[in-house]
């Protein structure tokens, strides 16, 4: 169990990706289909 943090990172990324596609997103009239882009990219920008 030397690299437990790598396993944890993969599990967390899988959880986020699955929830990101299956979970509800906020509806915004201006964005329509690009709402999912906003949902994924803005947190990524903050993370970077």
Image (tube, rainbow, N blue to C red):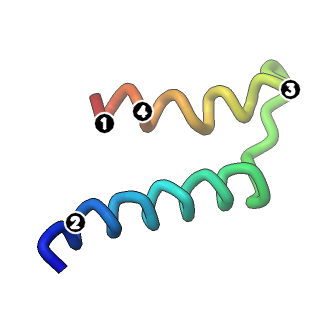
Query: Which residue carries the number 4 mark?
Result: 44
Of the residues under marks 2 and 4, which one precedes in the sequence? Answer: 2
Determine the image quadrant of residue 6: bottom left
Label 3 crowding class (10 Å Cα cut-off): few <14, some 14-19, many 20+? few
Mark toward the start of the polypeptide (3 vs 1): 3
SS class, disc 2: helix
Q: Quadrant of the N terminus?
A: bottom left
Q: Which mark is on residue 5?
A: 2
Q: Quadrant of the C terminus?
A: top left
Q: Secondary structure at mark 4?
A: helix
Q: CA distance from mark 2 to mark 4?
A: 20 Å
Q: Quadrant of residue 39?
A: top right
For label 3, the residue is 33
- Disc 1 designates what residue? 47
Q: CA distance from mark 3 to mark 4?
A: 19 Å
Report x, y in % for residue 43.
44, 37
Residue 16's x, y, as percent?
A: 55, 56
Of residues 16 and 37, the one nearer the viewer is: 16
| Residue 15 found in image quarter | bottom right
Q: Position of residue 27 (x, y in %)?
A: 81, 41
Above or below, 32 against 5 in this view is above
At 74% across and 31% down in the image, what residue appears?
A: 35
């Amino acid at each position: 169990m030397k690299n437990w943090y790598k396993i944890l990172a993969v599990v967390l990324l899988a959880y986020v990706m699955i929830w990101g596609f299956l979970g509800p997103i906020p509806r915004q009239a201006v964005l329509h289909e690009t709402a999912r882009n906003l949902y994924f990219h803005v947190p990524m920008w903050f993370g970077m």
